[in-house]
Image (tube, grey):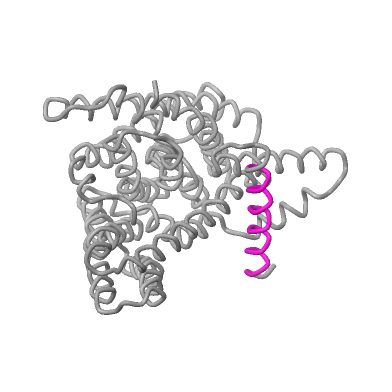
Amino acid sequence: MSTFNVIAVFITIAALAGYLNYRYVRLPMTIGLMLIGLCMSLGLIGLGALGVDIKGTAESFLGGINFGETLMKGMLSFLLFAGALNININDLREQKYIITILATGGVIVSTCLIGTAVYFILILLDLAQPYIYCLVFGALISPTDPIAVLSLLKNTNAPKSLATKIAGESLFNDGVGVVVFTVLVEIAVGEGGAGPGHIAVLFLEEAFGGIVLGLVLGWLAYRLLKSVDNYSVEVLITLALVSGGYALAAAIHTSGPIAIVCAGLLIGNTGREFAMSETTREHLDMFWELIDEILNAILFIWIGMEILILTFSWNHLLAGILIIPVALLARFISVWTAVNTLKFRRAFSKNATLILTWGGLRGGISIALALSLAAGPTRDLIVAITYVIVIFSILVQGLTIKRLIKS
């Protein structure tokens, strides 16, 4: 199927699902779309069991699209930029210590805790896997998903400081998560050079390199924006910054997500204040809000429909259910440690640890990383468990976090 037809199908499904959610389901848009996509998939599975072979056509359609590559090398850059564009850099600076600890040490601690617990759980279920692959799973499920988190925050009235912590962590922990995931995968497949020196170099290339690249590209885009006063040209400049910057980051082996987040923060703050007219600001915000909403709609429908092509067994499902509390506990421990380390320096809002724990959603990025593993039984197991945790995270945590914040 052509790329145009694939896009047409997803936009059509997302539009119909969005209409149904707005008129009848009335859930937050992204959660409602994912739930509708999941129900559609389960309905097709049911029809398939009755002999109506619509499921086969849908499986063939979804199987021909690489979810991981489409998200990580296409949609993610636009979604991250749209999110970073609306974050106040001064608010972020005030929360820099807690964000840094959660986005670095928090990810590493969570990876170790989850990986160790998963190793023993899988043994009990006769699904035993090498310990290194359990750590790989811990690395891909530990970072919070910026797409899911930023979408969630639109529908809550969280205190500004708390919302900044949640959003800031989710935007920056991908770089650390991807580095940890990449190193562990290299060890798992037996590739050499995964010693402390290699890890340090990889971290510098990915994280520090991404920061430098993002700031340089953001500054160049800022200079271009400042020299013109035409909103259509300025919107095109931001589009070029996102697409070209992400492609350049991949080519020179730095973190594309971190680069785009840094560029987005620069344009959304310095660029918005000094390089744009009021008309340009209005059109730019409207354009990127629309991009954000459309891509989120497509992504969450896609997540809901992915169940059609995943390999599940009852043991896989049980493993996923048992690992949900493990992932939450590991998240709680890392957040509790960070909060208690810093509580003597600054005050935290009521229930901050619980809200940061429950608001740390997992989403499409975890699924994309799981799907990037080499095909085989181990990948099938990891993808299935990841999918169960992501569905729980978005549906259960996403629908209840607002109530927790109000309590």
Measured as percent of width and height from the top left, residue 196 is found at 21, 48
Q: Which residues are magenta?
A: 3-21
User: Which picture quadrant has residue 42?
Assistant: top right
User: Which picture quadrant has residue 46?
Assistant: top right
Q: Residue furthest right?
A: 51
Q: Residue furthest left?
A: 345
Quadrant showing the N terminus: bottom right
Measured as percent of width and height from the top left, residue 363 is found at 48, 42
Depicted 272 relative to depicted 388: above or below: below
Measured as percent of width and height from the top left, residue 113 is found at 35, 29
In this figure, what is the number of numbered marks? 0
Measured as percent of width and height from the top left, residue 254 is found at 30, 62
In-image side of 89 versus 253 (left or right): left
Depicted 314 relative to depicted 71: above or below: above
User: Which picture quadrant has residue 344?
Assistant: top left
Quadrant showing the C terminus: top left
In-image side of 88 versus 380 (left or right): left
Depicted 257 relative to depicted 382: above or below: below
Q: Residue at x 66, y 48 (%)?
A: 19
Give 306 or 344, whichever is nearer the viewer: 344
Give 160 or 84, whichever is nearer the viewer: 160
Depicted 394 relative to depicted 80: above or below: above
Q: Residue at x 15, y 30 (%)?
A: 346
Is residue 19 on the magenta stretch?
yes
